[in-house]
Image: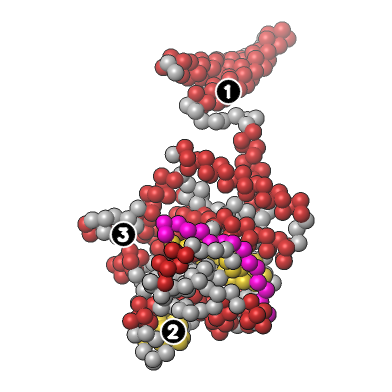
Amino acid sequence: MKFYEWLKPGLKVKRWFFFGIFGVLLIAFGFTELAIRRVYDYYYKLFYIFLNITGILVITISVMEITKSIIRINNKRQVNISLNSRKIENLIDEKRLLVKGPKIVTVGGGTGLSTMLRGLKYYTSNITAIVTVGDDGGGSGDLREDLGMLPPGDIRNCILALADTEPLMEDLLQYRFKDGRLKNQSFGNLFLAAMNGISDNFEHAVQKMSSVLAVTGRVLPVTLEDMKLIAELDNGNRVEGESQIPEEALRQNSRIKKISIEPQNAKPLDDAIKAIEEADAIVLGPGSLYTSIIPNLLVKNIAESIRKSDAIKIYISNIMTQPGETDGFKASDHIKVLRKYGGRNIVDYVIANNGDIPTEIKEKYALDNSSLVELDKKEVKKLGVEIIEEPLAKIEKGYVKHDSEKLGEVIVDTIMEKKLLYDRKKIIEYMYVSKKIKEKEKRNKRNQ
């Protein structure tokens, strides 16, 4: 496009602006004459009234034309702005439907939780992620020690999972410095640390970062207190620190017997309790059983609120066992541990993977003493927990992960069927819109 072609709408803006000023002058002159010089006869008064009306029309026309010119300028800049835009209508429909989606509260931490959130955001904007703050390793641990703030890592991952950001922005916030004093530190962690520095507390910092990144739903730390994880092993030894627990359990060849937190009466966020009370569904996991999920249940009133909630309670079973935490665990073992810390009514449904894992991947995991979590159906049913099986595994860079899109779909299907009893038309509508949103996101990524 030639420069003068782009410039034309801009010149029109100026032209109509001065035209509007002319209208203001007409009104000013006509009104002044009517107000001050009252000796004119009837025809002169009509003339000045006509000037006022003409001035109003001139201003109205100028405002309309300036608006049209601005829209043309934006269109020339390749910004799709149109009052009749079909894209805007579709976006409004999508947002309207997501707002009506089920109220889902997720409880956990680590990469498993953020993976699940990426899939859930296609179906509802009523998501509240309650995230553990017991992490003391890596970059989060360094910031926790240096700045006295709560660990930002798991919070950052959940915010990015729910955020409506460009791929470049996500890459930037996930970037880890490779050298110097900031080596292995995430830029996203530093961003949240800076927000914490200009906020009243960590909760407000999370809210501000979520606002900047246009997050779908909410991300809440389970507590604002400086929570520390403590494990007692079968051999009687005590281990402090989330990052040390699985390592010491492996080194000492001793299972985890008990998990606790300090302070024992850590107070939860009021918003977290309120979200649990109002939820249609509460989802535990996926993630490290002892170091990501259980710590949330140990915070005062969290487990009790989940038990008392009318929501359906869903546990997302891990696909692989975790060395040092769940060695040799079956699906029923996970549920028994959740009941030990959360009470009998902490789980109603378990969603588990029944898809195949390539042999070479299983062999790779076996080298680290990790294996598939066996779904022992009879034992799970004895516990009064209903099983939902789906192929949920996804191989990414040689590692087994949950397929976020498939997992989100299964969770919402379960909520619709077991709790909300939406009609088939409503379910199809949700699935159609979520498909369109996912296709749009994939196109955006390809265009980057």
What is the number of the mark on residue 91? Answer: none
**Is 202 situated left or right of 93 in this image?**
left
Type of the residue with mark 1: Lys
Q: Nearer the viewer, residue 363 or 71?
A: 363
Depth check, front residue: 386 or 12: 386
Mark 1 is surrounded, within 10 Å at the Cα level, by few (under 14), some (14 to 19) or many (20 or more) other residues, namely some
Please say whether residue 399 is visible from this viewpoint.
Answer: yes
User: What amino acid does circle 3 point to?
Assistant: Gln
Image coordinates for residue 250, horizontal then vertical, percent: 36, 80
| Type of amino acid under label 2 | Ile
Which residue is identified by label 1? 68
What mark, if any, has residue 256 been given in the picture? 2
Which quarter of the image is occupied by the C terminus?
top left
Q: Identify residue for label 3.
A: 185
Residue range (magenta): 384-398
Q: Is residue 388 magenta?
A: yes
- CA gap, disc 3 to disc 2? 30 Å
Quadrant position of residue 54: top right
In the rendered view, tell whether residue 275 sits above or below residue 331. above
Residue 208, placed above or below residue 363: above
In the image, what residue occupies the spot 52% across and 70% down? 318
Q: CA distance from mark 2 to mark 1?
A: 68 Å
**In the rendered image, which quarter is residue 274 located in?**
bottom right
The N terminus, quarter of image: top left
| Disc 2: CA contacts within 10 A as few (<14), some (14-19) or many (>=20) | many
Secondary structure mostly seen in the magenta stretch: strand
Give the distance between the C-alpha atoms of the residues marked 3 and 1, in whole angstroms. Answer: 48 Å
Above or below — where is 134 with respect to 255?
above
